[in-house]
Amino acid sequence: MGRSYTEIPLDGFRKEFNIADKRVTLYVDDLNSEEIFEVLATYIKHFNVVLFWLLKGVNTYNDDHYGDESISAETKGIKAMKFKTGKGQNYRIYCREFFNSDKTKKKVIMSYAFHKKSEGMDKKLINLLKAIGEYDYEITW
């Protein structure tokens, strides 16, 4: 049995920002949801920007807000929601992306919240990304 996750309703956000595209759905990992929601509550304005870019389309990315964190085959499909402030805070919510067979729909699961303290990829972060890559989510369409 895979890890459980819960859908985040986005209809209100889509309506407010006039986003008709519903091909992207967002979820949160149930085991890590408390930490993830703490980061989202702290950076709600940043999260709105991330959501805007995330919901623009199946293959739309803005690396300043939501971008690729894959470093190997073990971490393929891992992306990061990026929450940076001028006060030296640099939080990430690492996500797993899953596409349907014809790549017209995408599910994004917010998997893990992390306070990134260095510019590059240190050993701790690399090991974390590999562990997230092993999270076993049962995806249904």
Image: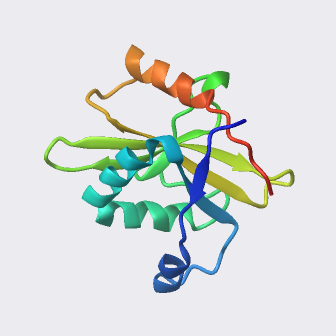
Q: Residue furthest left?
A: 87
Residue at 48% of width from left, 68% of height from top?
52
Residue plotted at (73% across, 43% down): 138
94 with respect to 84 (left or right): right
State the residue at coordinates (53%, 72%).
10
- In the drawing, does residue 105 fall left or right of residue 85? right
Q: Is residue 64 left or right of residue 109?
A: left
Asked whether 8 or 66 is in front, the reply is: 8
The N terminus: image quadrant:
top right
* The image quarter in which residue 103 lies: bottom right
Residue 59 visible in the current orientation: yes
* Quadrant of the image containing the C terminus: bottom right
| Residue 122 visible within the image | no
Nearest the viewer among 96 and 1 is 1
Q: Residue 123: percent from the left, percent from the top? A: 41, 14
Residue 4, percent from left and from top: 62, 45
* Position in image of residue 18 (x %, y %): 53, 84
Q: Is residue 7 above or below residue 131?
A: below
Residue 21 screen position, x and y as percent: 66, 75
Left or right of 31, for residue 1: right
Residue furthest front in the image: 1
> Which of 53 and 136 lies nearest the eye of the viewer?
136
Q: Tell me where residue 113 sits by quadrant.
A: top left
